[in-house]
Amino acid sequence: MEEFDPVIVAYCCHYCAYTAADMAGSMRLGYPPGIKIIRVPCTGKVDPLHVMRALMDGADGVLIAGCLKGDCHFKNGNIKALKRTAYLKQWMDEIGIESERVEMVMMSAGMGKQFVRIVTDFLDNIRLLGPCPKNTNQQSNRILSELV
Amino acid sequence: MITAERKPLDEIASCIEPYNRILLVGCNECVTVCAAGGRKEVAMLSSALQMVSMKQGKTLSVVEMTLERQCDPEYVESLALHIDGVDAVVSMACGCGVQEIARRFGQVRVFPAVNTKFMGASERAGVWAERCQGCGDCLLGLTGGICPIARCSKRLMNGPCGGSGDGKCEISGEVDCAWHLIWERMKALGIEDRYEEVISAKDWRPARGGGPRKIIREDLQ
Amino acid sequence: MKANRPSDHHAVLIIGGGIGGIKAALDLSEARKDVILIDKSPAIGGVLTQLDRTFPTNNCDICTLSPNLSAGARQKHIDLMPLTQLTGVEGEAGNFTITLTTAPRYIDTEKCTACGLCLDKFPKYIRFTPGLDHRAPTCMRYPRVTPHAFSVKRDQCSDFETLASVCPAGAIIQGDKAKTRQLHVGAIIVAVGADVFSPEALDNYGYGKLPNVVTSLEYERIMSASGPTFGELQRPSDGCQPRRVAWIQCAGSRGQNKGEVSYCSSVCCMFALKEAIVTKERFKEDIETTIFYMDMRTFGKDYEMYYQRAKEDYHVRLKRCRPHSIIPADPDGALKISYVEDGFGTLEDETYDMVVLATGFRPSAESTGLAKVLGIELNDHCYARTGSFNPVATSRPGIYACGVFEAPKDIPETLVQASASACLAGKHLLPAATADSTEPVYPPEKDITGELPRIGVFVCDCGQNISGTVDVPDVVNYAGLLPHVVVSRSVGYGCSRESLDIIRKTIADKKLNRVVIGGCSPRTHESLFQDTLMQAGLNKYMLEIANIRDQNAWVHADRPEDATRKAKELIRMASAGVVESHPLIDHILELNQSALVIGGGVSGMNAALELAEQNYTVYLAEQAGELGGLARQIHRTIDGSDVPTYLSGLMGEVRAHKNIEVILNAVLVDHEGLPGMFKTGFQIAPQMYYRQIEHGVTILAVGAAPNRVDDYLLDKHEAVCTQMELGNLIHTAPDKVSDWENVVMIQCVGSRTPDNPNCSRICCQAAIKNALWLLDSNPDLNIYILYRDMRTYGFLEDYYLEARRRGVIFVRYTPESPPVVEAGGAGVHVTFNEPMLGMKLMVVADCLALSTGFKSDDESTEDLAKIFHLTRTGDGYFLEDHTKLKPVDMSVPGFFVAGTAHSPKNIGESITQAHAAAGRAITVLSRNLINMGASVAQVDKERCATCLVCVRACPYDVPFINEDRYSEIDPSKCHGCGTCASECPAQAIQLTRFEDRPMMAKLEGLLERKL
């Protein structure tokens, strides 16, 4: 069987995680290509709905990457994002999807190395969980059609 | 304001299980303000229900709409355009809205997606608490602006009872004793003497005691 | 060009287009002052452009620098004149008349597209090589040369007409002649740098005869991706990859022999460590790296930790000795080095595949002549002579020197001096020059309402940076098939001038209304491409950048197929997003043109004074009850300058200045606002009343603290003191000092230790300063300086030599066997190893001076960092935005750092950084408006349920429910975080640029499964 390559949507705050990701690039630190970064002005801008839609549209996991506690460029957007992540996890539980598919992480702009470690660990964890519902269906559909 | 809380997802999902196409209707009044059934919640629930279906290997199509007020027939009328294309309706409004849709569109099943809880106030961001039970005969003028019917666990008219301790109700340390609050308020207002006046037994007929209620303003008809 | 250009009278002439000159030019242009930047070579860029990676970040700095060189808006103020030299200066500060002579290029830079056809046909006639490396590549000086054009070597060109005929652009001009012109400028900055020493003169190292002996700069070129071997490490003799590489430090520096100079070149220790680390990073166990050195001079900010990393993490071998010679070991090119390591005493023979000579600086050949033209003095080493208390001011008022032309130094220090000299030079210009008249003018914006999306996709290859991993043509083809995409093409370096021209032209030709760039990070390049859109008459927000370099090609280099697929996905996401974009208007606010300087020491006062002199209001807040800071305890500098006189003069000027308000006893309590409109609150002791200051920028100059240790009987025996206390004693009790017979000094006490891992930088010079001062009054005194590495960088080496000449005894100790100090009556007994003799010695010292150096003022930097949201280093100094390229700016816009709050430094260096901070502050303050950007929350009043969620959620209390009963958000107050938008239960709030529609479109674009 082909190994499952998870697709991760990473909402990255412009002021920290997005910069850390750029830094990982300039340090040429590799991480899995399944990590897809979407830039946001602050993790406080990450709408729970956008996370739901990401999972619905085919992401296997969503990472919300913001500034360290106390370092938010907008005072407390990261703390709000943290609470919202907990709220989203309740939804996930209700839907019956592993709540580990959504995580909030915090880092500073200089933490290129940590960025790589965090996203790689997250992706590895999602790999263990397997594909998200939409992707499961697509796969099962594909298998069916091949059988037919 | 009427407050409500979303029902557990599996309850909603099991209601609509037989259907493939649903109309999900929010309300831009009370349930928006208490973050239970506004446009955002409609979108969230819609995504969640679709994901539940996906997990079951089905495809659910959801038409999302949010009305200005679901308890007014004119607003509800705007659903007529969509009703034929769906198998069932799920309403995120309070019970009034659910019933208004059911009244107007007798041919489709209508399911509530929220539990209507109480008439309340928002204490701070994200916290709503019960304040009024609509008894039809307001006595807040006697009790320093704190309602013993909505806020005393026993609805005592002359409290407190022996379960009051340190200002809290015996049912939970989280619940203030309404009569303790009333006493403190009366002290602050300098009307402690009123506390001794016995409030006579309440006439419950203006409340639900007299059956379903109705208000009519002739001049507006 | 004639002398009647309207801006001539206000311009600054900058001589030298290296990084120092470029930085000074950019700073001045940001402050809206005009600059004439001349360079004798055909292209600007200097030495930096030849470096592969730079310490301590190990990044390629050309990537960060190059966008600035072609940044359109700034260049409005910069007149770039390559092949030009200064041939005459008359007049005085504020009104110089200069004569410039420009050599013929024979190529019209306006027409030349650098297509390279002339080079293909007539390689001998065309100039483009670095010109310093006998193994130089056939490429332009560096991949993004500015100006982007070739030049003709006239003397070697025999058939000009044929040459001219090959140029399709008709750019080759046969009759080009030298031009001389006279201009007026207000000030001059000299940034000509220095030459890199060529070690042919050192016959013992065999450079030039032994092919595998190379200079450090040649090694850089060999390792560089744009170098002669395209980044393959090959030894010159046979192209094999070396297994053992040695570096020999101080090649040509710190010497007395033929061809050597006596001073220290300051940067060689660090670049040797860097080259060794980069080599080890790439080849790991396949290669062994050895550095032969005399003293490891890693005295800069966090450099000591870099040195320790080289040793501990990369296992770079470090041998303390100066090998006499390099001898051929076999006919294949192996080299033998015989050496005796310091402290071991046995002769070792080792063979190496390659030896790198760490060659330092020589005054540039032109400096003597240039100094004569400029009328400025040079020092004994032929570098610019400048003031002790103003290291960028030359002997002639109005003429400033920065960078290596002043003294050997690294890039951050060059940039600090560049900003400082830009600040000081700006003072001589007429105020009219700061008017807003030269802002870039854009064509009127096209109305695109009702148009269907027409997207142009432009994919960069960024040299090999993207195309080395990603199949760019495949991505371009794919993008061309995406919905609404009208044109898709690759553009090489998208940020280069000619590519920007192509993009602009394509927008017009294809009537594009939206643009997608597949390139590097929008963090660094968005404004550049936005500028291009505006020049093409498009709203600048009709742009999306897909980060296919930093977040794709660079991180997936090992998986090219996946990287190509991901590049397609990212471009698909960007084009789906850009469909949903719409024209936006930036919100503009008025800027508060005053500065808050925190810290009233030498740095703070100098920064305040410079700003005040240039007519900005300054609030100078000091926590203590008096100005002066640590300098109050210092009496003289190493060159004998009188500190108290200088300090009292400075304090007098600051107190008397009409534009400066000094606020003493001020304790910082709160802070809010945005760059350009800050509000900072203080409590003023002793009454502790609250005062709020409104200001546009903040300069941090809170200094560092003198370190103190509980060791070596300090505070326990009266004969033991710190180096600073010894200075006090020499000044106040000369009689006592003249009775002494033996004085011992111990270096690195409390620095370079596990608790305080960095070098305090100033202790070596302080010890030598005090030693020489003691000998002035007591020539018979025996002075022993116990040290680990003597770090008398640059011309400080002169004083080290003088101290040795006058009999000061220097003895090295290691941290493993430190000196032992015991009380012995009125004095102390100091016992230490003498490595040369290999035995223990004991000295009865009348005085033991401990070089305790600095430590960060942890408490105040921590408070400030918390209140201002600033970052600090591990040891509590403020951490600047970019350790290499932005040494004065903090990462929070509007904040600048100066003096020892940044890192340990001496008075002159602190003053320079203070001037630099003032200069950087002026780049902000000189604008009278601030652009808040276009990202603000907007309320759909039809949807608003007046629920108050936004009112409660906003971190800045901006939304309110207005009289018309909906939430109103003032765009001029909105910070654009988007929290309200993501919490609004009615979906009534949208954050412009990040609305639901483009965000969802991006998701759908990204996650679409088919490729």
Image: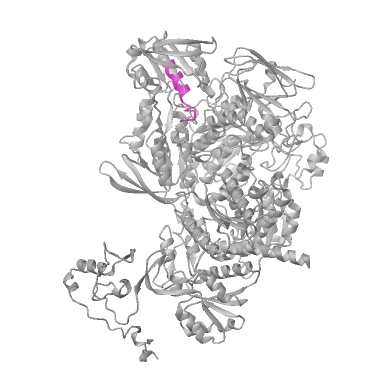
Q: Which residues are magenta?
A: C755-773
Colour mode of the rendering? one colour
User: Which corner quadrant of the image does residue C370 belong to?
Assistant: top right
Q: Please give left or right for residue A54 compared with residue C820 in the image.
A: right
Pick whichever, C243 or C532, lies toward us: C243
- In reply to whether residue B168 is colored magenta, the answer given is no
Q: Is any part of residue C378 visible from this angle?
A: no
Q: Residue at x 50, y 86 (%)?
A: B103
User: Which corner quadrant of the image does residue C604 belong to?
Assistant: top left
Pick whichever, C427 or C504, lies toward us: C504
Q: Is any part of residue A143 visible from this angle?
A: yes
The single residue placed furthest to the left in the displayed view is: B193
Residue C163 in the image: state x and y as whole percent: 81, 40
Q: Please give left or right for residue C641 compared with residue A29 in the image.
A: left
Image quarter of the N terminus of chain C: top right
Question: How many marks do you count on the picture?
Answer: 0
Above/below status of A15 relative to C409:
below
Residue C242 in the image: state x and y as whole percent: 73, 28
Above/below status of B168 relative to C600:
below
Above/below status of B142 relative to C796:
below
Pick whichever, B152 or C820, lies toward us: B152
Residue B209 in the image: state x and y as whole percent: 34, 85
Q: Residue at x 54, y 9 (%)?
A: C837
- In reply to whether residue C758 is colored magenta, the answer given is yes
Residue B70 in the image: state x and y as whole percent: 48, 80
Image quarter of the C terminus of chain C: bottom right
The single residue placed furthest to the top in the displayed view is: C780
Q: Please give left or right for residue A4 compared with residue C635 in the image.
A: right
